[in-house]
Amino acid sequence: MAITLGQRSLARLDGVHPDLVRVVKRAAAMAETRDDFTVLEGVRSREQCWANWGKGRTPAQCRAVGVPTVYAQPAAAKVTWLGNPLASKHAVQKTGFGHAVDLAPFPIDWNDLTRFDRVAALMLAAAKAEGMPIRWGADWDRDGKPRERGETDSPHFELDR
C-alpha cells in the first residue's frame, strides 16, 4: 500500500535536497493508509529562521547574534537551541538546498506520539532503503530511544552528512 502526498506537501518539498525528497517519497510509498502524513515545512527563509530563533529570547539576545530585535518574543516558548539562528538544516545549505523536513501524521494530533513514531519508522526504513543517512529530531543521538534526553522535535528529519 502507499499514501499519496498532496499538492501542498509536494510544494513544501521545493528546494529540499533531492536525496531527502527521495526518502520522503519512498516513506510515502511504504506507508499504509493509517500512516498518512503531511509535509509541514521544508526550506525556511532567513526571516523564518530569525522568527523561530527569537521565540523565548529577548531583544538583547537577538541583537547579540544578528537577529533583528523585531523577532524577539521573550514570552514565547523557545523552539530552537541553535547558537546560530541560520544554522538550521531547514535553511539553504552550501549545496543550494535545505537539508531538513518536518512531517506530521495526518490528521495532526500533537499529543499522539505513537503516530509520530510510526512516521519516523517509515522515514528511517526509507532512508535505509535509499542508502541515505538521516537523523530524527526525537532521537538526536540515534540510540533508538526517542525522547529519553528531552529530544522533542518529533516532526523533524534531516540529512546526516
Image: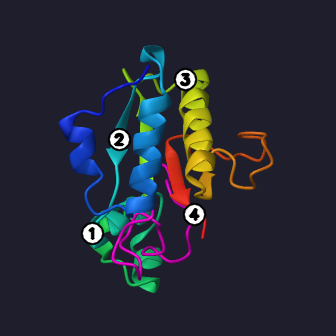
Residue 44 image point, x, y percent: 32, 62
Quick one: SS at disc 2? Answer: strand
Residue 68 magenta-drawn?
no
Residue drawn at (58%, 27%) of the image: 118
In primary-sequence order, the first of circles 2 and 3 is 2
Q: Is residue 13 at least partly visible in the picture?
A: yes
The label on residue 115 is: 3
Q: Nearer the viewer, mark 2 or mark 1?
A: 2
Disc 4 to disc 1, C-alpha distance: 17 Å
Question: What type is the residue that disc 2 sits on?
Answer: Val
On screen, residue 53 versus residue 157, left or right, reads: left
Disc 1 crowd, CA 10 A, few/some/many (<14, 14-19, 20+): some
The answer to the question of whether label 3 and label 1 lie on touching residues, with beta carbons closer than 8 A, is: no
In primary-sequence order, the first of circles 4 and 2 is 2
Residue 91 magenta-drawn?
yes
Question: What type is the residue that disc 1 sits on?
Answer: Glu
Q: Is residue 74 at least partly visible in the picture?
A: no
The label on residue 39 is: 2
Q: Nearer the viewer, mark 4 or mark 3?
A: 3
In primary-sequence order, the first of circles 4 and 1 is 1
Residue beneath label 1, please?
47
Q: Which residues are magenta?
A: 75-99
Disc 4 to disc 3, C-alpha distance: 25 Å
The label on residue 81 is: 4
On screen, residue 63 versus residue 81, left or right, reads: left
Residue drawn at (71%, 45%) of the image: 150
